[in-house]
Image (cartoon, rainbow, N blue to C red):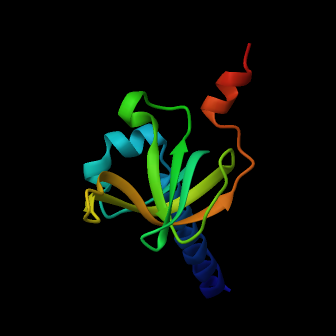
Amino acid sequence: MRLYKKAALAVLLMLGFGFAHASDATKTVEAVNLEKIALSGKTVIIQGHVTKVNNGIMKRNFIHLEDGTGSGDTAHLIVTSTETATVGDNVTITGTVALDTDFGFGYLYPLLVEKATIKQADVKTASHAKSHDH
């Protein structure tokens, strides 16, 4: 019986650490912009609102994302994915932070979230909430 309890405790601890690690990766658009050097090469999870989509460019889709955080250059992110979204969608993306990506032909991106998975999210982003709070 003791072995069973120790094994169960070990499994719970591993699951707990896994969830803690996943939640640590959740970032705002502003945070990814401000912490881009520390996040380079790491996986992040971001919830946001799709503001622009360019599909089928260099075998990938470029999705522009905002969440109401940041201002100026820190208020949006560009995400690349083989998946796509529609302008106006609220999504959760999971991807890898990449710095100074040069696709050639003048396409240089100081910050991208690459190879992202995109899931529809029923979230109310800060920017969406601002436009409806009066």
Question: In the orientation shown, which residue stands out farthest toward the top?
Answer: 134
Residue 25 x, y percent position in the rendering: 46, 55
Give me the residue at 32% from left, 60% from top: 98
Is 74 situated above or below 132?
below
Q: Looking at this view, is 13 or 42 the one in front?
A: 42
Give me the residue at 25% from left, 65% from top: 104
Is 120 situated above or below 103?
above
Question: In the orientation shown, which residue stands out farthest toward the front?
Answer: 105
Direction from residue 66 to residue 38 in the image, left or right: left
| Quadrant position of residue 68 | top right
Would residue 47 be visible to someone looking at this image?
A: no
Direction from residue 133 to residue 48 in the image, left or right: left
| Quadrant position of residue 35 | top left
Is 49 situated above or below 131?
below
Would residue 19 be visible to someone looking at this image?
A: yes
Q: Looking at this view, is 4 or 114 the one in front?
A: 114
Residue 16 x, y percent position in the rendering: 56, 64
Residue 92 x, y percent position in the rendering: 61, 55
Give me the residue at 25% from left, 50% from top: 37
Number of disc labels: 0
Where the N terminus falls, by quadrant?
bottom right
Give me the residue at 56% from left, 53% from top: 53
Residue 8 x, y percent position in the rendering: 63, 78
Direction from residue 16 to residue 125 in the image, left or right: right
Where the C terminus falls, by quadrant?
top right
